[in-house]
Structure formats: C-alpha cells, structure tokens
Image: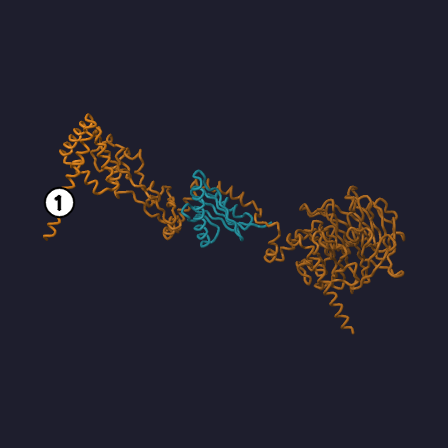
Chain colours: A cyan, B orange
Amino acid sequence: MSEVEETLKRIQSHRGVQGTIVVNSEGIPIRTTLDNSTTVQYAGLIHQLAQKARSTVRELDPQNDLTFLRIRSKKNEIMCAPGNEYILLVIQTPDAS
Amino acid sequence: MADRKAELERKKARLEQMRRERQEKVRQKASPAEGGDDTKSKPQKDLRSETDDLLRNLGIPEASTVQTVVTKSPSGGEEVVHTVKTSSRSKVKLSLCKVNETSIAPREQVSYSKETQTLNAEPVDKDGSSQQGSPRFGSPKFSHPNLEWDDEFFDDDDDDEVLVYDDPQRSDDEADTDSMDQGVDSLPSGMPQVKMVDPAKTAEDLVKKEEPPVVRELTEEEKELILNDPEFNTFISKTSRIMERALAENYDILIDYSGGDGENKEDDLLAGERLKLNRTFYDERWSRHRTVTSLDWSIQHPELLVASYNVNEDAPHDPDGIALIWNNKFKKTTPEYVFHCQSALMSTCFAKFHPNLVVGGTYSGQIVLWDNRVNKRTPIQRTPLSAAAHTHPVYCVNVVGTQNAHNLISVSTDGKMCSWSLDMLSQPQDSMELQHKQSKAVAVTSFCFLSGDVNNFVVGAEDCTVYTACRHGSKAGINEAFDGHQGPITAIDAHSVPGQIDFSPYFLTSSFDWTIKLWSIKDQKYIHSFEDNSDYVYGVEWSPIHPALFASVDGNGRLDLWHLNNETEVPTASTVIDGNVALNTCRWHQSGHHISVGDDMGKIHIYDVGEHLANPKSGEWSKFVHTIQELKQHAAEREDDSNLALR
C-alpha cells in the first residue's frame, strides 16, 4: 500500500501538477490530493467523459480500446489513464517554456 | 293499354317474319352450298347439328340464336364469342388441370419517417451485458425476420421470434414453399407492417435518468480494501508510469510561430517574466568590494564572460586590477580564469579574432594582454608607459576589423587614440590626437564604431558633448560635435542590428544628467531624450537582434528595457537589483536573450529577457522607421516651441 502512496506522491510532486485523483469504475474517488468538492466534481465529470470516450473508441472498432485521454485547455491540462476498473486523473498546468 | 298490346303484337309478328326470312336465306345459302359441295357440307351440317345437340344438352342456346344476339349488340367484347364459336368447329382437345392458387404478397412499401433513423445505441451496463432495449424499428427486415425464405420453417421453437403455426399437426414435410398462405396467416398482424421510426435515444438521455442515485461516498474500510487489492496496485504502477511520461512532456503544442498571438500574450504576462534573474557571478576572494567596470561576452564561446574590476580599497595588498572570466554554462560559482594586473582595470574585451586573448585598459594608461593558454595570471604583454602610448586612463578598448586585418583601438581620456597590432604591443601602429576645433582635446569616456565601419566612430566626452570622428582619410579626427547632454557622457552605443532597413546612423548616449538620448549622426540635435531615470545613467546598449530594443542601467540599481515600438516614454520592462547597489555597466549577450549587469559591489547579474520581448517580429523594422519619424516630428515641434518661447 505504501508503494501506491509513494507513487501517487511522486506524481503529485511533479512539476506543475495541481492534483491527482484515483476514481473507481463507478466514478467514486478513492484517493485524492484536492479538496472534497473539487474532487467530486472532477471525478464525476471526467469519469463520464472517459466512459463516453471509451465507448466511442469501441464502437468505431470493437477490437480497440481507450488507453489515454488528454484534455488540453487554456489554463491547464487534464490527463486521464483508464484501467479496467479504475481511472487515474492528473491535473497539470503546463509551463510554456 | 290497348295500343301497347297492339304494338307488342305487331313487333312479335315482325320478329317472326324476320326470323322466317333469315331462315329462308340460310336455307338458300345452304342449298347451293349443298349442291356445290355435298361431301363437305353434309358432314358440316351433321357436325353442326351434333354440336348444337351437345350444346343444347349443356344448356347453352343454339348457335343461331347466339348469332342473332350477337348481331343485335355488336361490341368488341362479343367478338370473342365469335371466335369461340368458330374455334368450336374444329375439334378441341380439353384436359383437366389443377388450378394453382397463388397469392403473392403485395410489394411492401417501405416508408421512412423524417426523424432520425438510427437504431438505439445500446448503453453498456456495468457488468458488460447489453440491455434488452426497445424493439428495433426500421426496415422490415428487422421487424419481421420471419420472412426469410430458408430459415423460416425450420427454426427451433425455443425462440420467441419463430413462426407460430396455426395448425400444429402439419409436419415439416408438408412445408411447401409454394404455398405462402401460412406465412402470411401466421403473422399476428396479418400483412407486415412498417412502423414509424422513433428518434434515436442517445446514451445521454438514459444516463440522465441514472444520475440521481449515484454519488455515494466510500467508507474508510472500503477504501482500505481497495488500496490493498493487488489489482489496484498493478493498475497504479502501470498507469503511473504512463502518467509520468506524459507529465514530463512539456512541449507547447499550441505555439504559434506566426507571432499573431504575441500581442495577446503580452498583456497576460507579468513584467517579471520579461526580465528574470538567471544567476549571479560573485567571487568572495576576488570580486569583493570591487566595482565592475566593464563586461564583454566572448564570440567564439558564447558562455564566457569577462569582467574587469576596479581597485579594492579594503585589500591594499591585492592586485589593483582584476579580470575574471566567468562561465555561464555550468553551475560552478568560481571563475574560469583569474587575471591580475598592477593598475585598476577600466575596460576589458575579448580579442575578437583570437579566442585566447583578453585585452585590458588600465587606469595608468597601460594596455595589457592576457593569454589563457599560458598558466600565468599576469599579462603576457603590456604597452609601454610612455608618451607614445597612453598616459591617461584608458576607458575604451576595442578590436575592429576583419580576421586578417584587425587592430586594437584604444582611446584614453586625454584624447589620444592609438591603434595597435595584437602581436606587438611595444609601440602603437598609429596614434592620433582627438581634438576638436584647434587643440581642444576631447576627454573621451566612451566610444563606439558605427556598424560595419572601421573608419567612422562616435565618442562621448566628459564635456557633455558627442563627437563624430574618423580614423583615416582626409577628415581624420573629430568632425562634428553634438550638444545636448548636460552631464558627462558615460556610455555610447551605435545601432548594429542587421536587417532590411539600416539603422546604423542612430546611436544612444547616456550621461550623468539622468537622461538617455537618441541621436542620428546626420543631425546635430538629438531625436529623443528618455527621461525616466532618477540617477546617473551609467550604461546603455542596443539589443543585438531587436532593432527597437535597448537596455540601460543607472545608479539606483535599475535595469531598464526600452522597447521603442511599444513605448518611448517609459521602459517596457524594468527591474531593480536588490541590495541598494548601483549598476555600473551592462552588456547584452550576442543571442539577445540575456543581459549581464555589473554593480559596484563586485556582483555580476545575468538576466534572461522574455522571448516575446527579445525576439523581434518581422514588422519591427518598418515600425521602428515610423517610430523614429514620429520622434523626429516631436523634436521638430519642440524646437519650434522653444524658438517661439525664446522670442
């Protein structure tokens, strides 16, 4: 378990990372570094989006599957790595250097 | 009533008469025919009578009567009867045949509604099973798969969608594909119906109904359980690896090389990002309490910076003049090379075409030369302290020319300008007294050659005047004097940015009078005066890459960047060095992205200039032309005003 914590901490300490969230298949956050309301908001919204993205990929080609989802916005970047049952979300502010 | 009866009887009589007449005619016809062709007519007659008998038996009226009926109402349709009658003369062979009753299903008119025709997108449940959604509407093929020819009658009875036989006794053998009756009859609705297509229900609508029940918190125990799950561990290790790779990638995919968005970005960025302190060079042993008198970047090794230092009053036993070569590439905090000399160094520069040589001009008038190949800290060459060379502090040293034909030029504050060959510093190649208007020697504090020119240069003097001069030719010596400053000139720099438009006539001067002035060598009066400083301005320099950008340093510790196309009244970027120091000198890096400033405490600060500020856009040159024209206009107006005021 501590390895998990360590890994999450390492990701969190990366340059520009605002928050890290682990969400299960129902959209409920398991581990988070942000405050509760933000976490719940992110978890719910991104979970739905990831499901939709996954179903899109699958529909286009049933043998295909979603591996990584990256949303780049003006202010930050949301990266979502889905697994079979969980989803790892990281919110990062990219520095333009 | 009686009339009618009479009429009827009359008509009957007439009919009888007509009948008799016709019969007579027929007989008449028959008799000559008989006479002519006995053999044929006889069998014909017999045949006829036979057929008549036959027909009579069947209950069909005689042909003759039929004929009259026919003649009475001749119509196209009755012609058929004619033919029937005639064909009945020949012997017709008739046989029994089975009548095939076939009923063909009417062609199905498939009609589509104008609404969406997509089938329902089946949302995948959590356990992966697809929902048994609403029946599929659409083409009849889906609605009634029963109508497949082959499968139809051989399906298992397990399926719901199989045919329901009305007659259970019928075996499969009798399943005759010829007879389609059962197919049609077995459909519950009779003929296949085409129903309207409902609009597609997307997953969104369905999900919305599911929303309210979700959002329940996991208890701590559940979380612990999940965290201890090995599958969770593998998930984390796998995805964290991917995530870290993604995090490390920091390319800006949105970068716009056309520079169109540059204006928007500038508003967002803070001034602090335009000038950012990169590092500080300071050596405890050698640069303490010494004022940095000059800086120069190497051309062959862009990371090397040479700095000359003044005397350290606190350490009388240390050499008076120190020159240190710093390396910007590495993080080490000590200089690469340390050079000494006996007298305080006023100016220094790298020998442009000799990467190993460093030139220094001292307070005593000596010019010294160091070589970093030799393991000595003292100069390898020195100029003599004689009247042939300089006897006054040399504030200006510079190597001008080309690789094969270059000279070291030095000017001292007694107006003497000497040109030397770097191989031999024992005596100058050429020397000249810079005098203005009959023997008024010019005390030169700074000088600069015009861009690309080895002959013409401008000098700033202690008497607040700027002079243009030539080295060779008929006009050798001081040519023109520009008045304008009210204090001794500390620094002078000529524009040297290459570009479509040549700005080489323009130069900047800074002086003790708190101002920086922009001049053109073609005009005696300055074009513009920058008056934002509140202390002596000690240094000014144009950017090597940007035509409208220059930097200045003053005694308040302020480093200013002026972007003339943006703003000519105040600097575009400005920062104050903390520590209450005065900045004595500044020097742009040849890339145009760094500035080095030296202060009076012996520290050298390297600043990074924000790229959007340092890099010129393609329109900067033409914009600068406009800017200068505007400034000239203002200058002219000012002149007129002052003339008017004087009167």
* Left or right of B178 in this view: B372: right
Nearer to us in this view, B339 or B124: B124
Answer yes or no: is residue B304 visible. yes
Q: Vertical placement of B173 versus B515: above or below? A: above
* Picture coordinates of residue B50, whole percent (x, y): 15, 30
Q: Vertical placement of B257 versus B490: above or below? A: above
Q: Quadrant of residue B247?
A: top right
* Picture coordinates of residue A80, whole percent (x, y): 48, 46
* Picture coordinates of residue B5, whole percent (x, y): 10, 50
Identified at 64% across, 53% down, the residue is B610
Answer yes or no: is residue B318 visible. no
Q: Quadrant of residue A54?
A: top left
Nearer to us in this view, A1 or B209: B209
* Left or right of A91 in this view: B112: left
* Left or right of A63 in this view: B156: left
Q: Residue furthest left?
A: B2
Is the residue marked by circle 1 packed among few (<14), some (14-19), or many (20+) residues within 10 Å?
A: few
* Left or right of B570 in this view: B491: right
State how many labels appear.
Answer: 1
Nearer to us in this view, B140 or B98: B98
Q: Residue furthest top?
A: B39
Q: Locate the C terminus of chain B and report the quarter of the image it occupies.
A: bottom right
Helix, strand or loop under label 1 = helix
Chain ID of residue with mark 1? B
Amino acid on which disc 1 is placed: Lys
* Picture coordinates of residue B380, whole percent (x, y): 82, 45
Question: Which residue is under mark 1?
Answer: B12
Q: Vertical placement of A79 versus B503: above or below? A: above
Nearer to us in this view, B81 or B121: B81
